[in-house]
Image (spheres, rainbow, N blue to C red):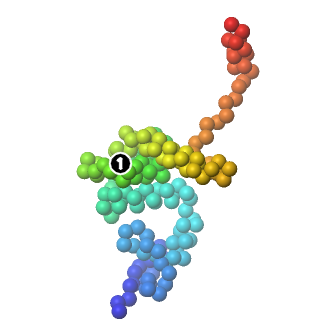
Amino acid sequence: MAAHFVICKYCGQKFNRDIEPFVEVGTRRYAHKDCADKVDASMTQDEKDYYKLEEYIKKLFNINTISAKIKKQIHDFRQEYGYTYSGMLKTLYWWYEIKDNSIELSQEGIGIIPFIYSQAEKYFYALYMAKIFNDGLDEYKPKVEEVEIASPRVYTKNQIKLFNMEDDN
Ligand SMILES: [Zn+2]
């Protein structure tokens, strides 16, 4: 029986994955479970989301590394439009897996995102609202990071005055 020796992505040591607990990291790469847990604990949510986005794009285009072009697109979309990494991932998922579009027109990039982001957002927002509805409002515990809640309208004295003036007409 051949032993499954692999190299840990994080500590670089060779180990037998039949004996030691391991996790798969990305495509055909492995790590000690302990090493992966340590890395996971040290990553911010943003870093985790970025990692997930890259892993998803690799799977989508069947590539091993993210091209400079795609890295730049991710960076630019974040800077210019304020998109989140998880939002970009969801958008790609919606376009290619739910809407079942072909990657043939992608030009090996993710330039489609700004054109479809708000549509994808609407889709996931509807799903989210359906989930709240189905779960029942009493059991629902709001999760701040998942939905943007509009800030409450604050009336200044001037606005109230204006409102009253119009009312008097
Ligand atoms: Zn390790």
**What residue sits 40% from the left and 67% below the top?**
26
- Most foreground residue, 112 or 73: 112
Q: Dot 1 surroundings within 10 Å: few (below 14), some, or many (20 or more)?
A: few
Q: Quadrant of the N terminus?
A: bottom left
The image shows residue 7, relative to residue 122, as above or below, that is below
Quick check: 67 left or right of 128?
A: left
The amino acid type, in three-letter code, at marker 1 is Lys
Q: Position of residue 162 (x, y in %)?
A: 69, 15
- Most foreground residue, 57 or 146: 146
The image shows residue 164, relative to residue 74, as above or below, that is above
| Residue at disc 1, secondary structure | loop
Residue 93 in view of the camera:
yes
Q: Position of residue 66 (x, y in %)?
A: 35, 58
Q: How many marks?
A: 1
Judged from this view, the residue extending furthest toward the bottom is 1
Q: Position of residue 116 (x, y in %)?
A: 39, 41
- Most foreground residue, 99 or 107: 99
**What residue sits 43% from the left and 73% below the top?**
24
Residue 83 in view of the camera:
no
Query: In the image, is the residue at mark 1 within 8 Å of ligand 1 by its beta carbon?
Result: no
**What residue sits 56% from the left and 71% below the top?**
38
Q: Quadrant of the C terminus?
A: top right
Judged from this view, the residue extending furthest toward the left is 104
Quick check: 42 left or right of 139?
A: left
Quick check: 145 left or right of 80?
A: right
Task: Name the residue that disc number 1 marks.
Answer: 99
Q: Position of residue 21 (x, y in %)?
A: 50, 81
Judged from this view, the residue extending furthest toward the top is 169
The image shows residue 168, relative to residue 95, as above or below, that is above
